[in-house]
Amino acid sequence: MLVAEVMLQQTQLAVVLPYWQRWLAALPSLAALLAAEEHDVLMLWQGLGYYSRARRLHRAAGQLLVGQGLSPDQSLDGVMASGPDGPDLWPRSLEGWQALPGLGRSTAASILSSAFDAPSAILDGNVKRVLARLIASPRPPARQLARFWQLSELLLDPRRPRAFNQALMDLGASVCTPRSPRCGACPWRGHCAAYAAGDSARYPVKDAPRTVPFQVVGVGVVLDGAGRVLIDQRLNEGLLGGLWEFPGGKQEEGEAIAATIERELAEELAIAVAVGEELIVIEHAYSHKRLRFVVHLCTWLAGEPQPLASQQVRWVRPVELADYPFPAANGRIIAALLEHLAAAGAA
Ligand code: SF4
């Protein structure tokens, strides 16, 4: 439940499902999660995005254990199997869940309701949409969250909170859908202001779209004379923290892309390279920015690589790249590199 809710924070159910199944097969218990290396946890998350969620889950496992006064080398399986009379591992309050890293009120409330049938109101994306339509809210839900939480609390059936919340989420997912809501099949249409106004799909209203900044990033796939390729591990902060990548950085105004790559590799790794042919160009859109990665093959000339802006750097054989967790965009760089090496007879 905890893993599923965290995966669902920024990702849709259909995308999450195979990841969740893979995760549970590899890490079937909190004890297994706690014992796993962060590298392996990130590998299981690879492709799901927002990787800080995986690292926080890892930390949450340790925090739950410490909360019980247990040391990390004690097996949690025994604790969890001890039944209602044994020590209770799981928090039973919103505050208890929100004290874990990466869990906000929405996730905490959803876990309490689903796992413990606690009278805890929920407010995920589906619920926000249903509520916005019920009251024909003239402002986006994100701009009046307190009001929406209040509304969800008011509607909650305290005798059957789990069933009510599940029904509310199902209503949003299957009837009050983002486009073309099926109001004719909706049990709440007699109480719905958006339906009464004859314009259900207009809600929730959205803010005017903002311009998303665009940035070109020069990336170097650096090969040494022994056929190894250079990768570095990002610092733990930020969207892609802890993942591995090919080194590079942002192109400055008026700068040629080869100069960007040379400069970035000198600044971040203290190495000199000869920038060779273009390997691939990749466009990648995040919610807050658009990036174009211009990737060139490079030959290492001088300097022992230093992790000046990363956790560590490593020379690896191209076939070993699959053993490292990379951001999604880097998967295409790896595929292009392997294809290039195969064509050159060097794979
Ligand atoms: S009547 Fe239509 S818009 Fe209103 S809650 Fe039901 S499905 Fe949504």
Image (spheres, helix red, strand yellow):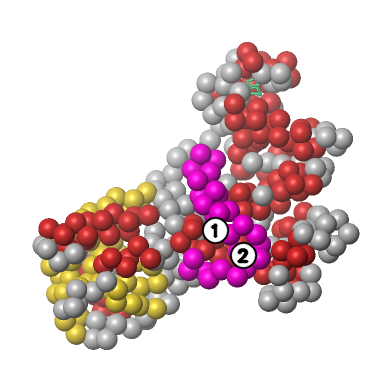
Question: Does the magenta run of residues contain 24?
Answer: yes
| Corner quadrant of residue 339 | bottom left
Quarter in which the C terminus is drawn: bottom left
Q: Disc 1 designates what residue?
A: 26
The answer to whether mark 1 and mark 2 are in CB contact below 8 A is yes
Disc number placed over residue 155 in the picture, else none: none
Q: Identify the residue shown where x is 26% and y is 56%.
A: 335
**SS at mark 2?**
helix
The spot of residue 288 in percent (x, y) is 44, 51
Extent of the magenta region = 11-40
Image quarter of residue 144: top right
- Circle 1 packing at 10 Å, graded few (<14), some (14-19), many (20+), is some
Q: On the picture, is 197 further left or further right than 237?
A: right
Q: From what the image shows, is residue 271 above or below residue 39? A: below
In percent of width and height, residue 96 lies at 77, 60
Up-down relation of residue 8 to residue 339 (above or below): above
Packing grade of label 2 (10 A; few <14, some 14-19, many >=20) is some
Of helix, strand and loop, which mostly describes the magenta segment? helix
Q: Amino acid at mark 1?
A: Ala
| SS under mark 1 | helix
Q: Position of residue 249 (x, y in %)?
A: 30, 67
Type of amino acid at the residue the image marks with label 2: Ala
Report the Cα–Cα distance between label 1 and label 2.
8 Å
On the image, numbered disc 2 is attached to which residue? 32
Residue at figure coordinates x 77%, y 59% from the top left: 81
Q: How many marks?
A: 2
Rendering quarter of residue 337: bottom left
The one of 247 and 87 positioned closer to us in this rendering = 87
